[in-house]
Image (cartoon, rainbow, N blue to C red):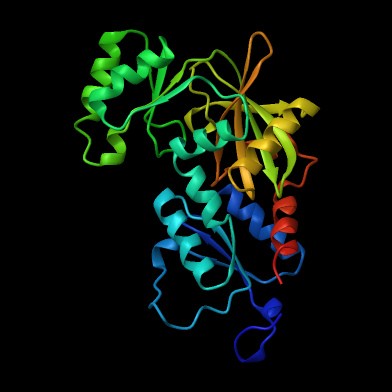
Amino acid sequence: MTGDGGRVRSSYPVVLIATRIRAEERMLLEAFRRRAVSCVHVDDRTLVYRVGGPPPKWRAVLNRAISATRRLEVSRLYEALDIAVFNSLATLTCCSSKIAGSLALHHAGLPIPATAIALDASSGGAAVAEVGFPAVVKPVVGSWGRGLAKVNDTDAAEAVFGLRDQMPSPVQKLPYTQEFVRGRDIRVLVVGGRAVAAIERAGEHWVRNTARGGQARACVLDPELTELAERAAEAVGGGILGVDLLETDQGNRLVIEVNGGVEFHGLAAAHPKIPVADVMIDYVLGRTP
């Protein structure tokens, strides 16, 4: 495949668009280096494009912007310029909203916790009533376990939604509630439709994200877990994804959400024999010219 002026696009660099070089980005850059594939880092905060101007001479974009808003626009921009982007705009659009993600998972027939959505903070109490107490109130857009609130009674729900009603953004006012499920917190990395590895996130607090101090340890990727994770990834559009699940004390597994900007340093540490970054790079290179 050729690019502008007949130049072979495969000679162009892959661009790692990332706000910061974290542990994950270092692993990815090293994986490109081992393959002798040209890869350059670009900070998403520095990007400027004049509409109608020539596209950059890039082979592909690996989109690792931290901000969900900028991450979405990075994929929108470079897909419009006919450059392969990972993850795609369609996938990120679904993953960036917990409402969109839950609807996609339910439509695909996957088991999810009881979930209720309202369109104004004034209806938050009614949404909680649909799932029952205790319930978890989550921001529609957010990551790292931030902004979650566990409500055990009507007074707590009233306080949470009263605060949400004062938020400046209409998105922050949207009530998104789920039943509180006790059990194991599991994340499965799915790349290109294939489950690669799984971890259990352990901790004293009910929010066990590694960003909140949760400890990652290896989890057996059994056939049922593999199927659930791969179906969940397909439901949101596929790509490089982190599928979050809960396993109840009775052994039932529920899909919580799918992350389009997945962090994987904990998973890589828990599975030192699995070349996690290399699996991602192989996927990217296998789907670009």
The picture quadrant where one finds residue 50 is bottom left
Compared with 258, 225 (above or below) is above
The picture quadrant where one finds residue 135 is top left
Percent across and percent down for residue 152 are 37, 9
Q: Is residue 11 left or right of residue 170?
A: right
Q: In this view, does 7 lie to the left or right of 50?
A: right
What residue is at 51 percent from the left and 79 percent from the top? Answer: 55
Percent across and percent down for residue 65 are 48, 55
What residue is at 48 percent from the left and 17 percent from the top? Answer: 205
Nearer to me, 156 or 108: 108
Number of numbered labels in the structure image:
0
Would residue 143 be seen by someone viewing this image from the given angle? no
Q: In which quarter of the image is the N terminus?
A: bottom right
Q: In which quarter of the image is the C terminus?
A: bottom right
What residue is at 73 percent from the left and 28 percent from the top? Answer: 225
What residue is at 42 percent from the left and 10 percent from the top? Answer: 134
Judged from this view, the residue extending furthest toward the left is: 166
Percent across and percent down for residue 26 are 61, 54
Nearer to me, 241 or 20: 241
Would residue 225 be seen by someone viewing this image from the given angle? yes
The picture quadrant where one finds residue 153 is top left
